[in-house]
Structure formats: C-alpha cells, structure tokens
C-alpha cells in the first residue's frame, strides 16, 4: 500500500509539473502552440546563415524588407548586396519563434557582410564601338570640349548636349557650335518674326514690295574680305551620352579619358589606287614604309609588285577615337598647272599620242575652302582666285581606236626557249633570241596571232619556211621553222585563222614554232603582249 501511495504521489507530481510547464509556456512571449496543419515553424536562412525562426514565410519576407531598408539608409548612393532567402519548415506541437527585431538585426549583419561595391551615378560616352565612363556631366562636357580644342586655337567653338529625337530612351547627342553661328541663327529668327509681323499688319503685297526694294546686287568680294581661318566644326563620329549607375572602379579619370579619346590610334583603312600612284608615294603619304604596306596586303608580293588604278589597298591611318571634321578658309599663293587638253584622233589607236604643245606653269593667289578630317585634307574647293600669270596647258593628240589584240599562235606546246640572250643551241644559231620557241610536234596548226596582211610567205633562210604578217597597229608577227605554209603574200587573214603547220625547217634543233612580235622593226618579248 505504501508503494502504491508513492507511485500516486509521483504521478501527481509529474502531472502537476507538466501542467505548470504548459501554463508557464503560455505566458512566455516566444512560445507558441500550433495546430496539426503541416509545416508550422520555419528556420530562416539568409545567404546560408541561420537568422531566426518564424511561424510563416510572409514574416520572413517582411523582415528582409526592413533589413534592406536599414542598410540602404546608410548610403546616399545605390547599394547592391546578395540576398538569398531560404526557409526550412517543420511541424511542431509548440515551439519558440524569434523576435522580429532580432531577425531584422541578424539579417542586417549578414547583408553588411555580403554588401557589394556601392553603385554611383555615372555618364557613359559612346563613340562608335568605344565607350568611356565619367562621374559627371561636367566631365563629359570637358572631354568633348578637349576634342574640339585640339583644332580650335581661338576657343571660338563649344559643345552643346542635345536630346536625340530619334531615340526612345533618354539619350543625349552632341552639336558643335560657334558664337558667330549662334548670333546668325538668332538674327535670322528675329528677322523671321519681324517679317511675320509685317505680313499681318501690312498685307502680303506690301511685304513683298519691301523685300524687292531691300534686295541689293551682291558685289564680288575682294581676296582681303574673306574670313580666313576656321569657319565650321563638327564631330565626324556619332556621340551618344547616357546616364547610368556603376561601381566607382569602372569610372575613368578625366585626364585618362581625354587621352584615350583624342590621342591618335592606328586604324586600318581602304585606299583606292588612282592614276599616277606608286607604292612608295602611297606609303610616304600615309607615314608608312613600303615594307609595311606590302605586309598588310596579301595581293602584294614585294616592293616591285604592280598596282593598277582601282586596286584597293589596306593602309594604316592614325586617327583618334573621336574624329573632328572642320572647314577652313585659307589664303595662299602658288604656281599651278593648267589642265591637259586632249585632241582626239579617230584614225589612231589609243596607244598612240603626240604632244602638240608643251605646258608652262602659271601663278595665282587663292582663297580656298579646305575640308579636314582630323589632320587629313579631304577636299579643297577654290572659292576665289586672282591669276597673275596664266598657265599654258599641255595639248596632246591621242588615238581613240581600240588597238588589236594578240593571242598565242598554237594550242599547247612547251616553252623551250625564251626571249633575249641565250647559249646558241647549235652552230650557226643566234645567241640573241628575237622571239620565243614552243616545242610542238611537226604538223601542229599555226594560227594568226592577230588579223592583218601577209607580207612574206615562203623560205626564210635560217628561219626555214616562214610567214610574216603586218597588223593594223603597225606591228609585225613572224612564224618560223614551218613545215608547210598555207597563205600567200598580200593575203588578208583574221585573228585565229590557220596560216601554216609547224615543223623543223631551217636552222633548227627539233620540231618547234619560233614566234616573234616586232614594233617599228625592233623585236620585243612576245609574252608581254599576248592575251
């Protein structure tokens, strides 16, 4: 009985303790009882760190919003930080949740540790594919003004930032202006307003009459009356300026930006060859060596490579990131040459010409409108000149007829002997070869290289059987060592017409065709004239 009493006392004690703990828990602010509805208590993690426990996810989101606000209040600039929120839920009968202030404080500490570099207001200047970031619009203005000042020694031109009407976003572009241009625009606007007022008060016919009376015949200006010097400037590249936010480390210092934008950089350009160009002149004009030009162009083998009008060459041109285009009125005196006068002769070929009058330089004083892109002249227009001594032009009479062409006189064949000096192939043969030889079997068809009149057809001593043809341009072709002649002297033949068969006659070492082209009686290398 005593044992049962002890057990009963222990049971009452245990039950009483449990009830006291239960009712005591009801009085604690962090202890809550939950119903059986699934996950009802959540551990809150921010960037992987445990910051407290909440009863629902919305409470965690509210705490993070408060923590973010608290961190951002500490800086006037934009603040970026890592905030990855994660919740782990579980179901409990009762549990202790964290105070909201404690969770906010824990989150704020985690955010401070993961805070990224402060972002600040900046301005990005874009020039083609080049960009530079500056800290203020004043620095942008100074950068662009530095590009202008490089070519404006009088400080007459400024840079205005204007809204780009073609862009939907807030993008600024630029306009280079001068005080003179601004005053002229203002004067024109005032005049337009005055004309409009007169139109309303006096009627259209009265205004028209006043305009007619105001017209004065513009007198031709003297050389001294022209504005000499810089008269217009603008940027040669599109400039765009946009506001942005970025880390301070991404910003450039003003001096560095000015150097990057205004310093000449080596840029590849395409140059089209014009009449009279040589590789040396092209290289010198662009401050390059011939070796550099050859190295940049795969079509050129060496400094002796032939270039033709219209060929396009890659050259290196020093240009800044931001190009400046300008116009200047310049006065200068010069000796000048008159344009060549050509007299056409329809009876001559285009390869024929004769100088009828030798030239003589003249002298003149000039005001010219010269256009530049950076330091390179892009155009020169003479707007006023006074000639002290007229230039005498060169007069050339030239042919207009297209000259005949020359083709290889046989099909196939192996070039067995070239033009010019050689070792005599046999006794009695010439050491100065006046044509070229193609080794080919006897009986190969020989065609007229060009149309003309046969002047000789028959035996030609060392040549063996030969055919000579006189052509309309005065040249002559010769075909030697033939086995059979198929034409006769005085006969007209056309280009490609069969005139003979190849052979091994005369002073010959084997079956071949000897072929010559003669100009004014002198033998030339036929390979230089065949198409």
Image (tube, rainbow, N blue to C red):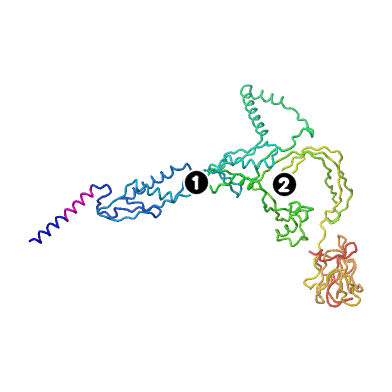
Q: Is residue 486 left or right of residue 104?
A: right
Image-quadrant location for residue 299: bottom right
Question: Do callouts 1 and 2 mark residues in contact (Cβ within 8 Å)?
Answer: no
Pick the residue in front: 77 or 171: 77
- Mark 1 — residue? 119
Q: Nearer the viewer, mark 1 or mark 2?
A: 1
Tag 1 secondary structure: strand
Q: Is residue 381 left or right of residue 181?
A: right
Residue depicted at 23% across the width and 50% down the height: 25
> Tag 1: Cα neighbours inside 10 Å, few (<14), some, or many (≥20)?
some
Tag 2 secondary structure: strand
Percent across and percent down for residue 280 are 78, 55
Q: Is residue 204 magenta?
A: no
Pick the residue in front: 131 or 531: 131
Give above or below for 279 relative to 99. below
Q: Is residue 130 left or right of residue 271?
A: left
Residue depicted at 64% across the width and 21% down the height: 202
Residue depicted at 73% across the width and 39% down the height: 328
Q: Which residues are magenta?
A: 14-26
- Mark 2 — residue? 376
Image-quadrant location for residue 123: top right
**Quadrant that contains the N terminus:** bottom left
CA gap, disc 1 and disc 2:
42 Å
Percent across and percent down for residue 178 are 66, 35
Pick the residue in front: 13 or 32: 13
Percent across and percent down for residue 450 are 83, 64
**Residue 187 numbered tag:** none
Number of numbered labels in the structure image: 2
- Counting residues from the start of the chain, the first of labels 1 and 2 encountered is 1
Give above or below for 423 relative to 100. below
């Amino acid at each position: 009985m005593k044992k049962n009493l002890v057990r009963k006392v222990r049971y009452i004690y245990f039950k009483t303790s449990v009830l006291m703990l239960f009712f005591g828990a009801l009085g604690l602010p962090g202890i809550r009882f939950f119903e059986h509805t699934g996950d009802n208590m959540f551990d809150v993690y921010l960037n992987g760190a445990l910051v407290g426990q909440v009863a629902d996810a919305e409470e965690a989101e509210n705490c993070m919003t408060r923590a973010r606000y608290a961190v951002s209040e500490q800086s006037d600039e934009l603040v970026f930080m890592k905030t990855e929120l994660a919740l782990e839920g579980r179901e409990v009968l009762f549990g202790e949740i964290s105070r909201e202030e404690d969770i906010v404080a824990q989150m704020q500490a985690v955010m401070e540790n993961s805070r990224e570099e402060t972002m600040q207001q900046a301005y990005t200047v874009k020039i083609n594919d080049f960009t530079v970031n500056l800290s203020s619009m004043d620095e942008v203005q100074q950068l662009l003004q530095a590009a202008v000042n490089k070519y404006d020694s009088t400080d007459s031109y400024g840079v205005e930032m204007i809204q780009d009407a073609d862009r939907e976003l807030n993008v600024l572009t630029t306009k280079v202006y001068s005080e003179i241009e601004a005053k002229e625009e203002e004067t024109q606007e005032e005049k337009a307003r005055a004309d409009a007022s007169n139109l309303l008060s006096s009627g259209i016919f009265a205004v028209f009459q006043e305009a007619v009376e105001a017209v004065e015949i513009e007198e031709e200006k003297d050389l001294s009356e022209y504005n000499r010097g810089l008269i217009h400037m603008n940027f040669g590249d599109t400039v765009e300026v946009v506001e942005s936010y970025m880390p301070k480390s991404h910003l450039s210092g003003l001096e560095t930006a000015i150097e990057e934008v205004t310093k000449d950089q080596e840029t590849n350009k395409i140059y089209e060859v014009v009449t009279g160009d040589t590789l040396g002149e092209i290289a010198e004009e662009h401050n390059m060596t011939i070796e550099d030009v050859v190295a940049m162009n795969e079509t050129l083998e060496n400094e002796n490579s032939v270039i033709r009008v219209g060929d396009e060459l890659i050259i290196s041109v020093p240009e800044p990131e931001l190009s400046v285009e300008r116009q200047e009125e310049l006065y200068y005196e010069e000796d000048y040459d008159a344009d060549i006068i050509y007299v056409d002769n329809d009876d001559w070929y285009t390869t024929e010409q004769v100088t009828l009058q030798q030239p003589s330089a003249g002298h003149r004083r000039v005001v010219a409108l010269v256009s530049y892109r950076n330091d390179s002249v892009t155009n020169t227009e003479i707007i006023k000149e006074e000639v002290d001594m007229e230039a005498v032009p060169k007069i050339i009479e030239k042919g207009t007829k297209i000259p005949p062409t020359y083709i290889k006189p046989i099909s196939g064949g192996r070039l067995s002997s070239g033009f010019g000096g050689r070792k005599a192939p046999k006794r009695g043969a010439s050491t100065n070869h006046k044509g070229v030889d193609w080794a080919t079997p006897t009986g190969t068809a020989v065609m007229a290289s060009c149309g003309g009149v046969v002047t000789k057809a028959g035996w030609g001593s060392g040549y063996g059987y030969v055919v000579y043809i006189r052509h309309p341009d005065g040249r002559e072709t010769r075909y030697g060592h033939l086995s059979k002649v198929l034409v006769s002297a005085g006969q007209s033949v056309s280009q490609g017409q069969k005139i003979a068969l190849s052979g091994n006659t005369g002073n010959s070492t084997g079956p071949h065709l000897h072929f010559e082209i003669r100009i004014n009686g002198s033998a030339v290398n036929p390979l230089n004239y065949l198409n």
